[in-house]
Image (spheres, rainbow, N blue to C red):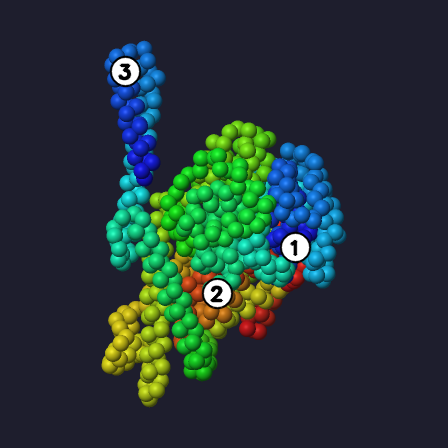
């Protein structure tokens, strides 16, 4: 079991969880995902330790040998959080020194990265808290971090892999799931728990984090979805083996959880992140009202209320677990708000099926074209070697099996992908690609242009604009001859590039923490 | 759905009871009326919600080649199977495409070279490379660049500008007759003030180097 100082998610240490119940503002979380190295997000302890009490007990039960120093601080306000931060840092470094299982070099790297980030986080959080006093942000951030952390814990249980690398990888992938603006891997699933979701990795959705919540609160979800939820079949065993998690089972049973048909939850699994309920309303985490947003990003007023009451001082996940003095209604209502609506799940399923059908058609067309191209290359080449000719020659050839109707028509496809800070819309007609990209954080035209070059797309027209915080680009380009790029690869690559690289760019004057990782400074 | 049915049943009963109560006892009326109105609004909302869900399920059913019975659970199940099947097909096709790509790369290369030559036709169209720089604000310049369009040329321009600490704000790019026109406002990345002449010469150099 590894203990990572400060933010590295090496899933096992619940001690870390004890100290880091919250994170700073959500931007910091959003910025911290990067695939490189042990840089994970910094967990700073902004508020109080209610989770520590339960988490601490859980950890103590489960981990046995770890020395748990549960901080006694009971600061319930933001004003106290600097002290908590410092306290947690000290505690972390204390724990770090006392756990020797980490390979030394990784520790060192992790420590330095963490400390840097922690410092940054500290600075930024303090700044943020004093400047904006934005409770919502910090709480949402905390929620994010906590849910991911929980996921990793459960993941650890499930996988039983003590190796740090594997955990790091899992953390990477978990982070990628959680922070959509981050990582968008190519379409090859990694062997981790979340693969069971069959979800492509391009965005985080409240859906996915709902599933993560289902892990972090195995009691609440397991009660309902045990049959259908393949993942949850793992969870109970994991939970049993880890009494820490099983500790979580009990308090929730008395709550009246919403019974939902188990099959709906399988929907959750099979829908990709881009099709989140409410995702059609706009992906950029609008605070307010959207009941499905809660887990992914900004926290809603309900959570704020919880915090302001001084009763529930921790993340939503813990909120579900802890007994609220206001009564269970708040927790159940909160849970219910987090769960995607049945109707919207079905609507998203419909959209997803349509998208999948389009993609299949597009890919079939391309495969056909390639196959025809190969056939014609065996014959003497005519003057016009372009796609139209290929199509015609294919139609003329008596190939029995394949249906050439695709090749007689123009290729067209359309795709839309969203991530936490980015939205991409790709339309392909024949060999022209129109891309609309809206990015929330940075002006990333240079990265986009480079990515398009790599995809063998020839830029013909770009219109870009800057509205408020948002950068939007409308790009017309042509597919170069012979390239068989398809819409989803364009969209995936763009999201990946934009989210990864733009996050690493340090914008002009002001300091944005969490974005810099030592290896990724952009030096002009 | 059964639970909803039960809940509705209860609501109906209480609604009726309250109305009887209303007729019988006038003093209690306000309270009971309020609750019955509340319950009937809830009924409407509930009904609407159920209709929404069933409409969507019908749409889903229409999209999916259902094999089994037409009830809610099987619709959902079959949709899941169908989605998984489609995902598999997508994967398979993508793999096939990758294979094709890999095996036909030799064919692709000569074509690319042809393309590059074709793109460089500025001289034929008579449009000259040009750079204009104007000050529009304290720290902003407006630039207009015309240069010969080459594959990857724009990217190189952007990267060079970035390397020199210039950032495009609101760039617009169009292409015509083998030349590319870039007009944009430019800001220093570090907030420094930019000199017009210096910037102009810098851009000319960059363009010539592309």
Which of the pair A100/A62 is nearer the observer? A62
| Residues at marks 3 and 2, CA–CA distance in whole angstroms | 66 Å
Q: Which quadrant holds the N terminus of chain A?
A: bottom right
Task: Identify the subunit bearing mark 3.
Answer: B
Nearer-N-terminus badge (2/1): 1
In the image, what residue occupies the spot 34% across and 62% down?
A: A358
Residue placed under numbered mark 1 in the picture:
A1
Indicate which disc residue B173 carries.
none
| Residue A243, percent from left and from top | 59, 46
Does the rendering let one see residue A18? no
In the image, what residue occupies the spot 47% across and 52% down?
A: A233
Residues behind callouts 3 and 2 on a single chain: no
Q: Nearer the viewer, mark 1 or mark 3?
A: 1
What crowding class fits label 3: few (fewer than 14 Cα within 10 Å), some (14-19), or many (20 or more)?
some
Task: Identify the subunit bearing mark 1.
Answer: A
In the image, what residue occupies the spot 69% across and 58% down?
A: A102
| Residues at marks 2 and 1, CA–CA distance in whole angstroms | 28 Å
Which of the pair A95/B31 is nearer the observer? A95
Which of the pair A335/B203 is nearer the observer? A335
Residue placed under numbered mark 2 in the picture:
A188
| Residue A307, percent from left and from top | 57, 34
In this rendering, would B11 be left or right of A271? left
Residue placed under numbered mark 3 in the picture:
B22
């Amino acid at each position: 079991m590894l203990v990572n100082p400060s933010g590295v998610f090496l899933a096992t240490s619940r001690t870390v969880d004890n100290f880091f119940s919250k994170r700073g503002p959500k931007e910091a979380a959003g910025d911290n995902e990067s695939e490189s190295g042990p840089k994970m997000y910094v967990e700073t302890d902004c508020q109080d330790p209610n989770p520590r009490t339960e988490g601490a007990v859980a950890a103590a039960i489960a981990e046995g040998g770890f020395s748990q120093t549960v901080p006694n601080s009971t600061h319930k306000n933001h004003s106290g959080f600097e002290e908590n931060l410092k306290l947690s840092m000290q505690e972390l470094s204390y724990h770090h020194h006392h756990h020797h299982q980490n390979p030394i070099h990784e520790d060192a790297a992790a420590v330095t990265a963490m400390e840097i980030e922690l410092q940054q986080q500290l600075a930024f959080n303090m700044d943020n808290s004093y400047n904006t006093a934005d409770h919502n942000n910090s709480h949402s951030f905390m929620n994010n971090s906590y849910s991911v952390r929980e996921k990793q814990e459960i993941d650890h249980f499930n996988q039983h892999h003590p190796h740090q690398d594997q955990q790091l990888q899992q953390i990477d992938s978990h982070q990628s799931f959680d922070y959509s603006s981050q990582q968008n891997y190519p379409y090859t699933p990694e062997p981790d728990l979340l693969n069971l979701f069959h979800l492509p990795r391009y965005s985080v959705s409240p859906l996915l984090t709902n599933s993560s919540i289902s892990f972090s609160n195995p009691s609440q979800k397991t009660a309902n979805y045990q049959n259908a939820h393949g993942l949850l079949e793992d969870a109970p065993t994991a939970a049993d083996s880890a009494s820490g998690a099983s500790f979580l089972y009990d308090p929730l049973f008395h709550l009246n959880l919403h019974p939902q048909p188990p099959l709906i939850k399988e929907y959750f699994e099979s829908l990709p992140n881009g099709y989140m309920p409410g995702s059609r309303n706009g992906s950029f985490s609008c605070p307010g009202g959207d009941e499905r947003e809660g887990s992914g990003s900004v926290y809603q007023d309900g959570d704020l209320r919880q915090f302001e009451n001084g009763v529930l001082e921790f993340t939503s996940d813990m909120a579900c677990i802890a007994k609220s003095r206001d009564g269970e209604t708040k927790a159940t209502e909160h849970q219910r708000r987090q769960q995607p609506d049945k109707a919207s799940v079905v609507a998203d399923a419909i959209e997803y099926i349509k998208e999948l059908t389009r993609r299949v058609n597009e890919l079939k067309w391309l495969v056909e074209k390639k196959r025809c191209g190969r056939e014609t290359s065996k014959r003497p080449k005519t003057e016009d070697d372009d796609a139209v000719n290929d199509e015609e020659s294919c139609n003329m050839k008596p190939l029995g099996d394949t249906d050439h109707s695709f090749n007689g028509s123009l290729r067209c496809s359309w795709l839309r992908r969203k991530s936490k800070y980015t939205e991409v819309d790709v339309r392909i007609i024949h060999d022209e690609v129109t891309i609309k990209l809206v990015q929330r954080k940075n002006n990333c035209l240079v990265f986009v242009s480079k990515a398009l070059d790599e995809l063998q797309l020839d830029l013909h027209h770009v219109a870009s604009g800057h509205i408020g915080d948002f950068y939007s680009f409308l790009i017309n380009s042509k597919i170069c001859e012979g390239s068989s790029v398809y819409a989803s690869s364009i969209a995936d690559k763009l999201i990946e590039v934009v989210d990864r690289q733009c996050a690493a760019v340090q914008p002009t004057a002001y300091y944005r923490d969490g974005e810099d990782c030592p290896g990724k400074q952009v030096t002009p | 759905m059964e639970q909803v049915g039960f809940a509705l049943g209860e609501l109906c009963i209480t609604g009726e009871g309250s109305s009887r109560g209303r007729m019988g006892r006038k003093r209690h009326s306000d309270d009971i009326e309020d609750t019955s109105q509340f319950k009937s609004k809830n009924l409407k909302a509930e009904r609407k919600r159920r209709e929404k869900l069933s409409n969507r399920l019908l749409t889903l059913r229409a999209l999916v080649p259902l094999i089994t019975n037409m009830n809610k659970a099987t619709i959902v199940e079959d949709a899941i199977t169908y989605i998984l099947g489609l995902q598999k097909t997508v994967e398979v096709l993508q793999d096939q495409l990758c294979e094709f790509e890999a095996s036909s790369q030799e064919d692709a290369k000569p074509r690319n070279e042809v393309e590059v030559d074709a793109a460089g036709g500025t001289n034929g169209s008579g449009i000259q490379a040009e750079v204009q720089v104007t000050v529009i604000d304290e720290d902003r310049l407006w630039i207009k660049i015309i240069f010969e369009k080459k594959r990857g040329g724009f990217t190189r321009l952007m990267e060079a500008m970035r390397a020199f600490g210039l950032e495009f704000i609101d760039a617009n790019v169009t292409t015509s007759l083998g030349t590319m026109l870039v007009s944009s406002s430019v800001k220093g990345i570090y907030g420094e003030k930019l000199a017009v002449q210096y910037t102009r010469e810098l851009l000319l150099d960059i363009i010539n180097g592309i």
